[in-house]
Amino acid sequence: MNSTHRQIAVIGGGLSGICSAYFLAAKGYEVAVIERRAHVAEEATFGDSGLLAPGAAMPLTLPGAMATFACRFEDEPRVLLASGTDFSRRRWMGATRQAQQHHFAENKLRLSRLSAYGQSLTQQLQAHYNLDNENGSGVFHLFRQPAEAARMEAMQEAARQCEFKHQVLDAAAIRTLEPAFSSEAKLSGALYYPDDQAGNCVLFAKQMRNAAQALGVSFHFESHVRSVSTEFGGRVALQVDSPHLAPQMRVDAVVVAAGMASAELLRPLDTDLPLRALQSYSALVPVKNPDDAPNMALYDDSYKVAMTRLGSRIRISGLLGFVPPSQTLPPKALRNLLKIAGDYYPNAANYNQAHFWSNTLALLPHGLPVVGPTRQGNVFVNVGHGATGWAASVGSARLLADMVSGEDTEIPIDGLQPRDVLA
């Protein structure tokens, strides 16, 4: 244990913040979690796809420049774009395509390795605490178009290096493994990962809150951190609006795990992370015909949409949007989610009874999370896990706890630290 970091504040009560607090408390630190909402897991974690799937874990990839522009005029867009010209969005998307074109294979390997680590930790925690889970095994990574399937070799190489069980399937083999697939669905192929899982990420986050509290972690809700500043002598000061906390809080170290709010908090500390807010959309539908419903989860590479079975419900999550948050969800997004589900499982659910919601994701151009110390040695960050970030969130939380305590990490962290994305 690093004796200079005895009291630690974690800003953010999503899965990454909860698990960061848990692993820090397990190492003997005194930890407080500060969350602006009334409960844990109410923002990005609430919109998580439910995939606990290192094989299917993907760095952010976007359509080509012209295809993305065309999405604005499509009835079934792969990416939602706000009207008008946004040069900062163009620059960010350009950086994303650079990472996609030149570093996809290595970033896929990094994310798969991190997610495998997180999946293993999750399974250990579920077994240790005898946690309820709705986990099911087997995930298809589906490709509609031959051009998308061209990335399959890089994915297979990551699977080989991480020693994931996987199979390359054609359309006939897909339907043999999952008879519920519609015979009309257009499929160019798939990678099937039998050991990947899907489950209830929000339930797991709430259970881990209880586990963290049992280790002494305190949670402070409806509390908004206005600023973070370092002080002479090695302490960190937090300005807080809270009904429960004093206006100023001093700690030995802080972990910023607050999604898009992280960028604003870190910028005055000479840490300008290139985070971009993207909207992600989800639907929950009741199963109508169990025999026609999926037994295994899928990830649609074209639309970046995941489908997971949760007992008598099906969750459909994904479809990124470069649009501002709104109380009114874009009709195109809602239609598209149900259209994608209907392509694969037309008779599985009562799609007319769908419950919709959206959430904001904080993403980085290389499509990976960042975890570790900033330029201020006692200010740490854990952010950018994406819509399929359950496993990555748990893995990065353990890495962060090891870095805070000055211990060696159990897996390589190259490409995952703040210095890897800062100019």
Image (cartoon, rainbow, N blue to C red):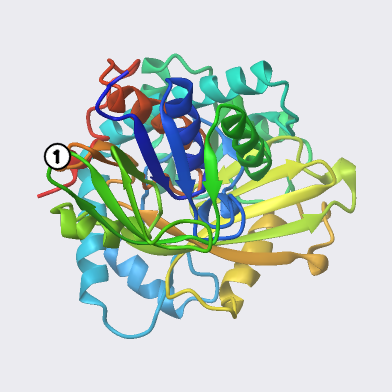
Q: Is residue 245 left or right of residue 158?
A: right
Where's residue 366, x and y in %? 27, 46
Vertically, is 334 above or below 306? below
Where's residue 396, x and y in %? 39, 32
The outermost residue toward the front is 246
Q: How many marks?
A: 1
Tag 1: residue type? Gly
Where's residue 229, x and y in %? 21, 54
Where's residue 415, x and y in %? 23, 34
Q: Is residue 291 left or right of residue 399?
A: right
* Location of the N terminus (image quadrant): top left
Q: Is residue 211 left or right of residue 361?
A: right
Q: Using a 10 Å C-alpha cutoff, classify the residue at mark 1 as few (fewer than 14 neighbours), some (14 to 19) or many (20 or more).
A: few
The outermost residue toward the left is 423
The residue located at (22%, 42%) in the rendering is 235
Vertically, is 406 above or below 152? above
Please identify the quarter of the rendering in which residue 68 is found.
bottom left
The outermost residue toward the bottom is 84
Q: In the structure shown, which secondary structural element does the residue marked by tag 1 occupy? A: loop
Mark 1 highlights which residue?
233
Vertically, is 206 above or below 317? above
Q: Nearer the viewer, residue 305 or 135?
A: 135
Q: Is residue 316 left or right of residue 95?
A: right
The residue located at (68%, 63%) in the rendering is 338
